[in-house]
Image (spheres, rainbow, N blue to C red):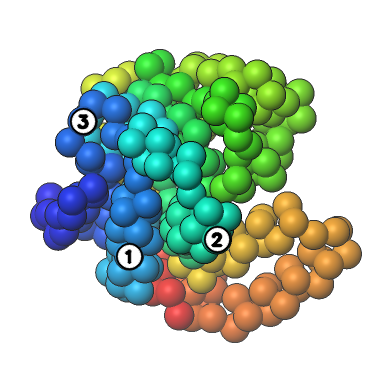
């Protein structure tokens, strides 16, 4: 393990081709603020542009992934103008979540504590979610007189169905780790002491996949979520034509014929 970056609200570690970004506010609850989201956006931009990084884990130090926004920040919002809310505060929050959701590389959220409001939205923006029995997903915005503004309104119903999404959004009900896996909100339930190791193992598995194909499939899944069937057919054909002309496709075919593990280079 090589630590490559330490910032006021985040730390970044490298494990070979896998980078682990940890929320680290120095408190057990890891409450977030706009500065945290600015740091996350900057880190994701750096990791996305680094060809040696093939997968990204979003983890944390402390007891919780994040228990939501910092209370002093919420207090300041009471007197904020619409312009400040729209163009300063939520620009930072939305930018970070969009970067995570649109990142062409594999993304994994590793959660063994509470992921509340913004934390839940960050987790939903990742491709995979690995959890322990102590994990908890909660879209409790309504208890603050607010709504989920960071993509959860779209992705949560797609993952768990309209019924459970309604329960989570309109009642603010928390969903624990085991239920999250059963409902399709999380992918794997692990024992608490294995969370980091399991996340790194999945990161290593995803890092070995063909980068161009992963990017195209991820974009296709997003496109399918956001568009109609016929548009998705056309988009899929365009992407497949480009992939068939790639070196990764040739390597994949040669590996099957030669019975060896492929070494994809993303070209």
Q: In the rendering, at what x and y percent does residue 26 appear?
A: 17, 36
Q: In the rendering, at what x and y percent does residue 201 appear?
A: 32, 41
Looking at the rendered structure, the secondary structure element under dot 1 is helix
Horizontal side of residue 94 vs 23, given as left or right: right
User: In the current view of this chain or complex, which residue is farthest to the bottom?
Assistant: 245
Q: Is residue 176 or residue 246 the one in the foreground?
A: 176
Instruction: Examine the image and state in which quarter residue 241 appears.
Output: bottom right
Instruction: Examine the image and state in which quarter residue 153 appears.
Output: top right
User: In the current view of this chain or complex, which residue is farthest to the front?
Assistant: 79
- Answer above or below: position of 81 versus 213: above
Question: How far is the residue under mark 3 from the one under mark 2?
Answer: 31 Å
Residue where numbered disc 1 is placed: 42
Q: Nearer the viewer, mark 3 or mark 2?
A: 2
Q: In the rendering, at what x and y percent does residue 198 appear?
A: 32, 34
Q: Is residue 106 or residue 86 the one in the foreground?
A: 86
Q: Is residue 224 or residue 118 the one in the foreground?
A: 118
Q: Is residue 48 visible?
A: yes
Instruction: Examine the image and state in which quarter residue 265 appears.
Output: bottom left
* Identity of the residue drawn at 12% across and 50% down: 1
* Identity of the residue drawn at 28% across and 42% down: 23
Which mark sits nearer the N-terminus, 1 or 3?
A: 3
Q: Is residue 206 visible?
A: no
Residue where numbered disc 3 is placed: 27
Q: Nearer the viewer, mark 1 or mark 3?
A: 3
* Identity of the residue drawn at 18% across and 51% down: 8
* Identity of the residue drawn at 31% across and 69% down: 46
Residue where numbered disc 2 is placed: 83
Which mark sits nearer the N-terminus, 2 or 1?
A: 1
Looking at the rendered structure, the secondary structure element under dot 2 is helix
Q: In the rendering, at what x and y percent does residue 96 appear?
A: 44, 56
Rate crowding at label 3 as few (under 14), some (14 to 19) or many (20 or more) other CA atoms within 10 Å: few
Horizontal side of residue 234 vs 206, given as left or right: right
């Amino acid at each position: 393990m090589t630590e490559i970056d330490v910032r006021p609200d985040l730390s970044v570690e490298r494990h070979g081709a896998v980078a682990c970004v940890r929320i680290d506010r120095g408190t057990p609850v890891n409450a977030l603020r706009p500065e945290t989201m600015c740091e996350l956006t900057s880190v994701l931009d750096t990791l996305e542009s680094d060809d040696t990084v093939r997968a990204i884990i979003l983890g944390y130090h402390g007891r919780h992934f994040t228990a939501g926004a910092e209370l002093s920040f919420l207090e300041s919002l009471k007197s904020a103008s619409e312009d400040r809310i729209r163009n300063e505060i939520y620009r930072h929050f939305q930018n970070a979540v969009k970067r995570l959701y649109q990142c062409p590389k594999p993304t994994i959220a590793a959660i063994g504590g509470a992921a509340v409001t913004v934390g839940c939205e960050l987790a939903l923006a990742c491709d995979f979610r690995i959890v322990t029995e102590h994990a908890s997903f909660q879209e409790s915005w309504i208890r603050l007189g607010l709504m989920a503004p960071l993509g959860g309104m779209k992705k949560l119903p797609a993952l768990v169905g309209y019924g459970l999404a309604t329960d989570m959004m309109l009642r603010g009900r928390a969903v624990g780790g085991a239920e999250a896996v059963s409902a399709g909100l999380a992918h794997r339930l692990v024992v608490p002491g294995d969370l980091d190791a399991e996340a790194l193992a999945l990161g290593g598995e995803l890092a070995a996949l063909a980068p161009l194909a992963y990017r195209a499939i991820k974009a296709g899944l997003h496109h399918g979520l956001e568009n109609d069937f016929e548009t998705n057919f056309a988009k899929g054909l365009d992407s497949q034509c480009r992939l068939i002309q790639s070196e990764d496709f040739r390597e994949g075919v040669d590996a099957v014929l030669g019975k060896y593990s492929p070494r994809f280079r993303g070209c």
